[in-house]
Image (spheres, coloured by chain):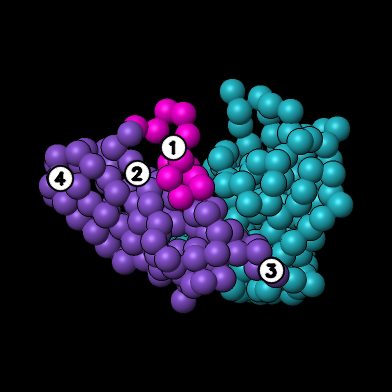
Amino acid sequence: EVQLVESGGRVVQPGGSLRLSCEASGFTSDKYTFYWVRQAPGKALEWVSLINWDSSHTYYADAVKGRFTISRDNRKNFLFLQMNSLRSEDSALYYCAKGGLYYYDAMDVWGQGTTVTVSS
Amino acid sequence: QSALTQPPSASGSPGQSVTISCTGTSSDVGNYNYVSWYQQHPGKAPKIIISEVSKRPSGVPDRFSGSKSGNTASLTVSGLQAEDEADYHCSSYAGGDNLWLFGGGTKLTVL
């Protein structure tokens, strides 16, 4: 079964850091683009970041550029999101999602998400 | 304010058809045929139901269909069923710096 499982979300103080993980199973993940997408309570989905298959290209939404870093470990089938200088507006459910071979391919598999709360 | 504009709500009776719009600009929806739609039930992760404007992934009922005209994409749900009650999100590839845009989501109620 194709599956993505996120972890690492917790309560963190403003200005703090957090590293989210996403484990892929049931498929060979090293061919595909991966995404992080977040959703604040009762709000819309928001694309956060993208990484291509070999980590040679990464992209970020303006809201997180310079503070978040996406990475992956293809040998272990993991995706990561390092989040620094966290703000209250970063509080959300963070999903990892699998794309296709290209940046314009849709997000066809989603995890259940991990919750990040930024609060003092 | 989301980058793509969707109506906040839509409704229909069982068996009826409902269409949800998703309006962007000539830089995103109007420029690429990479609009996707996601269904999200309460407390669940989004699930893809339409990719590349009108393609249905395997397992998605043919009651769901997508189309695009100019800067506006549309999702039509025909033969509404109770289990179709959910939030629906559109998304478009946009290139440039912000590669992907989402709409604000539409809550579909089956009356």
The tag earlier along the polypeptide, 2 or 3, is 2
Residue B36, percent from left and from top: 48, 50
Q: What residue type is labelled 4?
A: Gln
What is the tally of numbered marks visible in this picture? 4
Crowd around label 1: few <14 · some 14–19 · many ≥20 (10 Å): some
Q: What residue type is labelled 2?
A: Ser
Residue A60, percent from left and from top: 72, 65
Task: Give me the C-alpha separation between circle 2 and circle 1.
Answer: 7 Å
Q: Specify the label residue B16 is tagged with.
A: 4
What's drawn in magenta, residue-wise? B44-61
Tell me whether the residue at label 3 lies in contact with that at label 4, contact meaning CB atoms closer than 8 angstroms.
no
Foreground residue, B90 or B27? B27
Foreground residue, B25 or A39? B25
Disc 2 versus disc 4: nearer the observer:
2
Q: In what element is the residue under mark 3?
A: loop
* Residue positioned 69% across, 68% down in the render: B96
Task: Give me the C-alpha separation between circle 3 and circle 4.
Answer: 39 Å
* Residue positioned 77% across, 39% down in the render: A78
From the viewer's perspective, is A24 left or right of B32? Answer: right
> Same chain for the residues at labels 2 and 4, yes or no?
yes
Q: Say which residue label 3 marks.
A: B96
* Residue positioned 72% across, 51% down in the render: A20
Colour chosen for chain A = cyan
From the viewer's perspective, is A34 left or right of A95? Answer: right
Q: In which quarter of the image is the C terminus of chain A?
A: bottom right
Q: Say which residue label 1 marks.
A: B56
